[in-house]
Image (cartoon, rainbow, N blue to C red):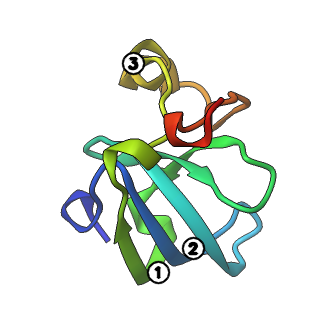
Amino acid sequence: MDKSAFKPDCRYTVAWRDAEGRVRPANLYVYRTYDKFMIARMLGGDGLLRKIAYQDVEKIVREQAVGAQEQFYIPAAVLEEKVWQDRSVMERYSTSPDLGK
C-alpha cells in the first residue's frame, strides 16, 4: 500500500501486520497521511492513536467517508509529522460534536 490508498477523515477496515508480524483485522479512523506513514485511531479497541506504516497494511477491505459532524477532532499540533518521528503510539481522547461531548 501507499499514501494514495488512504484519505484523511475516513474509516477503513483493513488487514494489517501488527508488531509481532501477525496479520490481523483492524478498524481505523485516519486523521493524517504522510509520505511514509499515517496517523490513525484503532476503533473498537484500546482507542490509541497509532503511527501505521503503509507497508504494514496488507489489504483494504472497506472504506467509508466520514461526514463533518461525525469527524473526530484532535489539535493539529498533536498530528504534526515531527511529533510522530520518535513515537508509534499516543493516548489522546477525542470526540465528535455530533455526540454532544
Q: What residue sits 60% from the left and 44% below the top?
A: 50
The alpha-carbon separation of the residues under discs 1 and 3 comes to: 28 Å
Of residues 25 and 63, the one nearer the viewer is: 63
Toward the top, the furthest residue is 77
- Which residue is labeled 1 in the image? 58
Q: Amino acid at mark 1?
A: Glu
Mark 1 / mark 3, whichever is N-terminal:
1
26 versus 7 height, above or below: below
Q: Is residue 101 left or right of residue 40?
A: right
Q: Quadrant of the N terminus?
A: bottom left
Other-residue count near label 2 (Cα within 10 Å), few / some / many at <14 / 14–19 / ≥20: many
> Mark 3 and mark 1 in contact (Cβ < 8 Å)?
no
Other-residue count near label 1 (Cα within 10 Å), few / some / many at <14 / 14–19 / ≥20: some
Q: Amino acid at mark 2?
A: Trp
The alpha-carbon separation of the residues under discs 2 and 1 comes to: 5 Å
13 versus 82 height, above or below: below
Q: Picture coordinates of residue 93 (x, y %)?
A: 69, 29
Q: What residue sits 57% from the left and 25% below the top?
A: 86
3 versus 12 height, above or below: above
Other-residue count near label 3 (Cα within 10 Å), few / some / many at <14 / 14–19 / ≥20: few
Circle 2 sits in a helix, a strand or a loop, which is it?
A: strand
Q: Quadrant of residue 54?
A: bottom left
The alpha-carbon separation of the residues under discs 3 and 2 comes to: 26 Å
Q: Picture coordinates of residue 66 (x, y %)?
A: 37, 57
Q: Picture coordinates of residue 92 (x, y %)?
A: 68, 28
Of residues 85 and 99, the one nearer the viewer is: 99
Q: What residue sits 65% from the left and 29% below the top?
A: 101
Circle 1 sits in a helix, a strand or a loop, which is it?
A: strand
- Which residue is labeled 2 in the image? 16
Of residues 98 and 32, the one nearer the viewer is: 98
Instruction: Find residue 76 and name its label.
Output: 3
Mark 3 / mark 2, whichever is N-terminal:
2
